[in-house]
């Protein structure tokens, strides 16, 4: 606030009433100012050129300085937004999921793994450093009590995730034992792949039975045309997710 002083005002507007506390932007000899009218001295016909200004509020130079200060504080905000945007790009980028609703049966031995049709998923990574999260959920039945082995396969059905072979003991991905022909067990498996490429990646599942008995997907071995849940059909799923790490 400036001290009161006398000044010459140009182009004073005509107003019907001026009271203490009112403000007006006027053109004075020393620039444009905002004044209040607490001690305003008014002459004939509201045309006086000499009066006392009480409490000079601001001027254009001060206002310009304030704007520059505000503008300067915006730049760090822009930087923060860019940082946040980069962080948002991390995480799950896409999800592909396949649901197999029909059944599939095959007679297979421990040396012949059969790829399960329609239980696979293909995904194209957007970055070379992305990881692929794989989730398998498979419903199986068997002709007799037996161990069923599974192999997770990739692209040209290479066995890309399995245990190391140990002498005569073959390495597979996972296994399950069905105790009876009425059973339809559910088996699950999850893992991470690092393809290191932006080429399409196709993942699938193969299975085999060590006794060369019939094995089934989405149904038990016993099958009677009835509404009893003992003979119901179920589903299997295969889901892959691209996760961007940076």
Image: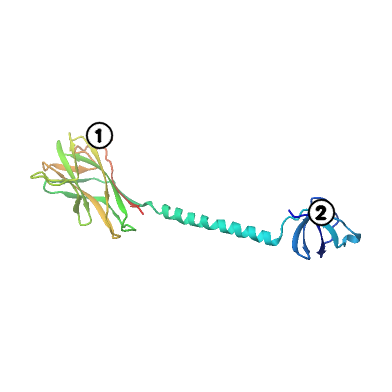
- 179 is higher (above) or lower (below) than 89: above
Distance Cα–Cα, label 1 vs label 2? 94 Å
User: Depth check: 231 or 128 in front?
Assistant: 128
Q: For the point 40% across and 54% down, which residue is it?
A: 89
User: Depth check: 246 or 178 in front?
Assistant: 246
> In which quadrant is the C terminus drawn?
bottom left
Circle 1 SS class: helix
Q: Position of residue 156 (x, y in %)?
A: 20, 57
> Mark 2: few, some, or many residues within 10 Å (few <14, many ≥20)?
some
Name which of mark 1 and mark 2 comes first in the sequence: 2
- 27 is higher (above) or lower (below) than 236: below
Res 37 label: 2
Residue lying farthest right?
Answer: 44
Q: Position of residue 4 (x, y in %)?
A: 80, 55
Q: How many marks?
A: 2
Q: Is residue 109 visible?
A: no
Residue lying farthest left?
Answer: 168
Circle 2 SS class: loop
User: Depth check: 201 or 213 in front?
Assistant: 201
Residue to which mark 1 is pinned: 230
Q: For the point 42% across and 55% down, which residue is it?
A: 86
Q: Position of residue 107 (x, y in %)?
A: 14, 45
Q: Is residue 141 visible?
A: yes
- 157 is higher (above) or lower (below) than 222: below
User: Depth check: 190 or 55 in front?
Assistant: 55
């Amino acid at each position: 606030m400036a001290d009161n002083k006398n000044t010459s005002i140009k182009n004073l507007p005509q107003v019907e009433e001026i009271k203490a506390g009112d403000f007006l932007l006027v053109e004075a000899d020393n620039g444009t100012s905002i004044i209040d009218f607490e001690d305003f001295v008014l002459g004939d016909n509201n045309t006086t050129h000499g009066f006392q200004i009480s409490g000079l509020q601001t001027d254009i130079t001060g206002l310009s300085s304030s704007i520059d200060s505000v503008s300067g504080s915006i730049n760090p905000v822009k930087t923060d937004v860019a940082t946040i945007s980069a962080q948002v790009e991390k995480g799950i980028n896409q999800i592909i999921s396949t649901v197999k609703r029909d059944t599939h049966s095959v007679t297979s031995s421990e040396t012949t793994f059969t790829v399960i049709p329609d239980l696979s998923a293909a995904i194209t990574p957007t970055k070379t450093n992305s990881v692929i999260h794989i989730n398998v959920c498979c419903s199986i039945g068997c002709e007799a009590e037996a161990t069923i082995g599974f192999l997770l396969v990739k692209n040209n059905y290479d066995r890309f995730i399995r245990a190391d072979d140990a002498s005569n003991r073959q390495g597979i991905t996972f296994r399950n034992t069905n105790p009876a022909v009425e059973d339809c067990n559910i088996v699950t498996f999850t893992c991470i792949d690092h393809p290191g490429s932006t080429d399409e990646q196709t993942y699938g599942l193969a299975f085999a039975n060590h006794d060369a008995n019939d094995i089934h997907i989405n149904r038990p071995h016993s099958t009677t045309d009835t509404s009893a849940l003992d003979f119901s059909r179920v589903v299997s799923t295969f889901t892959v997710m691209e996760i961007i790490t940076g």
